[in-house]
């Protein structure tokens, strides 16, 4: 006999797999409490939802909102040229998609769902949609797919009025450990290339944002953007756990005066059930285009000594500049260290991540991908010492293999917790946003890695010698390696108990709000 659902919860993720995958895992966890959980997505993300997701539980549902992607380019008859679609309003194709998404959500709430959910869990980067749910009297819960550290540091720097800091000054944030003190160099960091864009429409109108929001720190002394994004929320859920960030979870709860629960890390179920064994990404995630199969990657790793391989990957959305990629290639060429280097299409370029656009692209984006950096000839020069993967890489497999001894990473949150869970120390090469704070958490608080820096000890353009020194420091640091292994033991018994309890407390809280 089918069990009856206790009530309904809606979940609204932001675009991009780094936000979608944690939201899907959250849905699974909430469904275990006998809640009907409905994941609301734009239609172009449907291909990213595996059939196993809805098969996981009869309480899990997916609602697709019809959203048209920016039009594909087409040949103009007789001209021999491509017809380039007109620019989207405000110069960003996400604007039109968000408008359509908002209208679809309104329609679903009014006529399509037939239920009034107990609450809606909204990714903070979808905060523009709060008003829609509030107008339908649906309580809003804000969901951070990153850890607690970035929001904590943004808030702490605001309260500590760091805008008047001088070169060389270090300022401790009240309520936080001294190792998380703000340095003057911390204030000058930020994304390379195009400036960050706000999550608020430039014309001052309400409604969906004209662009996507950079996750970097505010201008020194400025109120953190996320405070406005969670305004009106009844609670906060964060993709973290007590073993990693209890202190920072408590800090946010104290400052916001809201219930805050760590409910992660929200990684695939198999991750938590396979401690000590090699993971196979194809069992959990859709395979994408790659020049190596998982079996070929395993064969290469099997040929390398224990803990000798440095794994290098900057994720699918951001990375160093082309000049820095060239320096990295030179450093690897001159090194004796075995390495796996993952290079994404369009590496070295900046702009709206293609994953946000549902696969649609313009001529400019096609050109960017064609002109993205690739280390021509490096594979020949290094021979079997290096493995250069273009496109998709089986990251969980690589991190769980005994031959992998270090991870040169941008320190995106998902990559960070995947490495932590498998005991791999991290060399942080942060590019933008919360990555800088994640790096500080890794190196200064958890002490399971190092931050790569130039010869002056600052953030900025890196040269081959800086990179070589960073890799050598990480791979030879037994203390950091042992600390990383020790911390990973906290995850060997499965999904963190503190997060299981956090989910239970959240469900109890939200149920009480409905009565």
Image (spheres, rainbow, N blue to C red):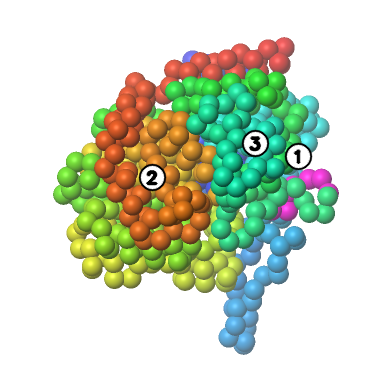
Question: Within the image, what quadrant is residue 145 found in?
Answer: top right
Q: CA distance from mark 2 to mark 3?
A: 25 Å
Q: Is residue 10 visible?
A: no
Indicate left or right for 125 with 478 as reference.
right
Task: For label 3, count other residues whose C-alpha is less than 10 Å away and answer few (under 14), some (14-19) or many (20+).
Answer: many
**Whole-percent x and y of residue 439?**
47, 41
Question: Within the image, what quadrant is residue 202 found in?
Answer: bottom right
**Whole-percent x and y of residue 231?**
74, 31
Q: CA distance from mark 3 to mark 1?
A: 37 Å
Q: Which residue is the site of mark 2?
A: 427
**Whole-percent x and y of residue 70?**
64, 61
**Mark 3 vs mark 1: which is more N-terminal?**
1
Question: Within the image, what quadrant is residue 483 found in?
Answer: top left
**Mark 2 vs mark 3: which is more N-terminal?**
3
Is 344 magenta? The answer is no
Indicate left or right for 75 with 422 as reference.
right
Pointers 3 and 1 in contact (C-beta within 8 Å): no
Q: Which residue is the site of mark 1?
A: 106
Q: Quadrant of the C terminus?
A: top right
Q: Range of the magenta residues?
A: 205-211
> Residue at image x 36%, y 23%?
490
> Residue at image x 34%, y 38%?
425
What element does badge 2 sit on? strand
Q: Which residue is the site of mark 3?
A: 157
Looking at the picture, does residue 299 appear above or below residue 366?
A: above
Q: Is residue 493 visible?
A: yes
């Amino acid at each position: 006999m089918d069990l009856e659902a206790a009530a309904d919860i809606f979940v609204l993720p932001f675009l991009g797999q780094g936000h979608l995958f944690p939201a899907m895992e959250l849905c699974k966890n909430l469904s275990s409490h006998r809640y009907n959980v409905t994941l609301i997505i734009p239609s172009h993300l449907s291909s990213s939802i595996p059939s196993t997701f809805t098969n996981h539980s009869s309480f899990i549902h997916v609602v697709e909102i019809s959203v048209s992607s920016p039009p594909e380019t087409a040949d103009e008859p007789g001209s021999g040229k491509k017809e380039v679609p007109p620019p989207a309003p405000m110069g960003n194709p996400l604007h039109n998609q968000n408008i359509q998404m908002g209208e679809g959500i309104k329609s679903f709430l009014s006529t399509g769902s037939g239920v009034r959910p107990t609450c809606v869990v909204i990714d903070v980067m979808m905060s523009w949609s709060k008003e829609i749910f509030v107008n339908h009297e649906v309580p809003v819960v804000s969901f951070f797919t990153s850890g607690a550290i970035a929001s904590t540091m943004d808030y702490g720097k605001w309260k500590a009025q760091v805008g008047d800091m001088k070169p060389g000054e270090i300022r401790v944030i009240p309520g936080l450990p001294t190792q998380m003190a703000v340095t003057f160099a911390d204030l000058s960091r930020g994304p390379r290339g195009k400036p960050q864009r706000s999550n608020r429409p430039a014309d001052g109108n309400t409604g969906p944002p004209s662009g996507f929001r950079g996750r970097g720190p505010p201008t020194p002394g400025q109120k953190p953007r996320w405070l406005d994004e969670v305004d009106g929320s009844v609670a906060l859920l964060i993709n973290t756990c007590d073993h990693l960030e209890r202190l920072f979870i408590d800090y946010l709860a104290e400052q916001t005066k809201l219930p805050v629960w760590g409910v992660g890390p929200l990684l695939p179920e198999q991750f938590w059930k396979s401690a000590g064994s090699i993971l196979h990404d194809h069992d959990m995630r859709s395979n994408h285009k790659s020049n190596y199969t998982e079996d070929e990657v395993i064969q290469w790793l099997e040929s390398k000594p224990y803990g000798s391989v440095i794994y290098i990957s900057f994720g699918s959305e951001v990375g160093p500049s082309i000049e820095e990629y060239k320096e990295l290639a030179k450093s690897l060429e001159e090194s004796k260290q075995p390495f796996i280097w993952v290079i994404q299409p369009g590496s070295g370029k900046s702009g709206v991540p293609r994953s946000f656009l549902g696969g649609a692209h313009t001529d400019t984006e096609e050109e960017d991908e064609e002109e993205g950096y690739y280390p021509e000839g490096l594979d020949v020069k290094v021979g079997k010492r290096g493995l250069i993967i273009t496109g998709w890489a089986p990251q969980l497999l690589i991190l769980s293999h005994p031959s992998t001894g270090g991870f040169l990473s941008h320190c995106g949150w998902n990559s960070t917790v995947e490495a932590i869970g498998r005991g791999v120390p991290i060399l942080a090469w942060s590019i933008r946003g919360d990555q800088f704070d994640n790096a500080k958490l890794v190196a200064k608080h958890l002490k399971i890695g190092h931050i790569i820096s130039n010869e002056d000890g600052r953030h900025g353009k890196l040269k081959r010698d800086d990179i070589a020194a960073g890799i050598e420091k990480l791979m030879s640091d037994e203390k950091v390696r042992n600390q990383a292994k020790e911390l990973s033991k906290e995850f060997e018994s499965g999904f963190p108990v503190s997060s299981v309890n956090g989910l239970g407390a959240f469900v109890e809280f939200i149920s009480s709000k409905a009565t």
